[in-house]
Amino acid sequence: MLEEAWHYLGARTASPAARRLGYVREAAALETRHRRCRDAWQPHIQATRAALLTSADRLETAGGTALIVGGGIARDLPLADLLTRFQQVVLLDIVFSRATRRLARRWPGRVGCCYWDVTGTVEWLAERRRIPPDVLVSRPSHPELSAKPAWVASVNCLMQLPLMPIAWLAASGAAEQHLEAFGQHLVEAHLDWLTAWQVPCCLITEVCDTAYDAAGQRLSGNDYRPLLARLPATASLAAQWEWSISPPGESAGGGSDSLNVEVWEF
């Protein structure tokens, strides 16, 4: 509890609306969970870093700016290695941890933190607490950067984008079927947002989850692959692996949870 409070107090966010919806609390919980599950998460972190570097190496020319969405907690980002390939790395997220801000200060002028709501809906939700109109969800804006990025990566955040907005709306009694459609819309809009940069993109995302009991027997699972239908026709699967996100004993009743992660390039 004390550790999570420390991370909470050290986090910085884009707006009071983001704090109100619980993004800071969620970031603090994630930081605490990372320490607790460090060994189980290490293969996923290493695979994420390797996938980003492989994708960056496919670019025809080095240099320019890399934009990384989901960079608020940068434990899965190979920043030092990326800076050998790019002149600048911009981390984009709605919340930045104390550790990430400190890390960015190691490379003044070369690593920056861009506070941004990539869904474009958080202010609306905080003010009105109802599902935003389709036109707002469909057209989240791009941040104004000093230079257009040469490469964009969305890292382990696509399927997380609907979670906080849906939790916020569910507390006000929104219908489940409407929340499900809204969540799908947020995911699709992010894929369109990435494509709209018109530069090479790397998407790292979970595509399904599985829950197991304490004996290792499968309890339930969800497949999110249909949500990737909005990927460009040119998108190619570059890598995949399993992430033990809740190792045995972490989940209630001594069970565990795993995610299947895929890397798509387009």
Image: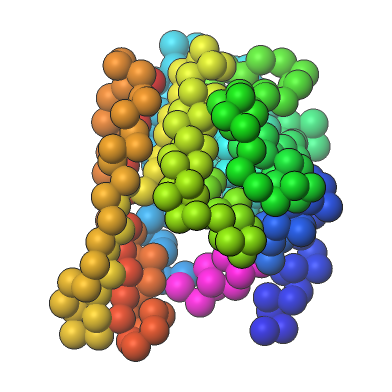
Residue closer to the observer: 142 or 150:
142
Secondary structure predominantly adopted by residues drawn in magenta? helix
| Residue extending farthest left | 217
Residue 141 image position (x, y, % from top left): 67, 24
In the depicted structure, whether residue 72 falls above or below residue 185: below
Q: Is residue 60 left or right of residue 254?
A: right
Q: Nearer the viewer, residue 1 or 223?
A: 223
Residue 62 percent coordinates (x, y): 53, 17
Viewport quadrant of the C terminus: top left
Segment colored magenta: 26-37
Left or right of 129, for residue 262 = left
Residue at point 33% right, 87% down?
254
Residue 246 image point, x, y percent? 38, 71
Q: Residue furthest right?
A: 16
Residue 151 highlighted magenta (yes or no): no
Point out residue 125 in the picture as x, y percentages from the top left corner. Answer: 70, 47
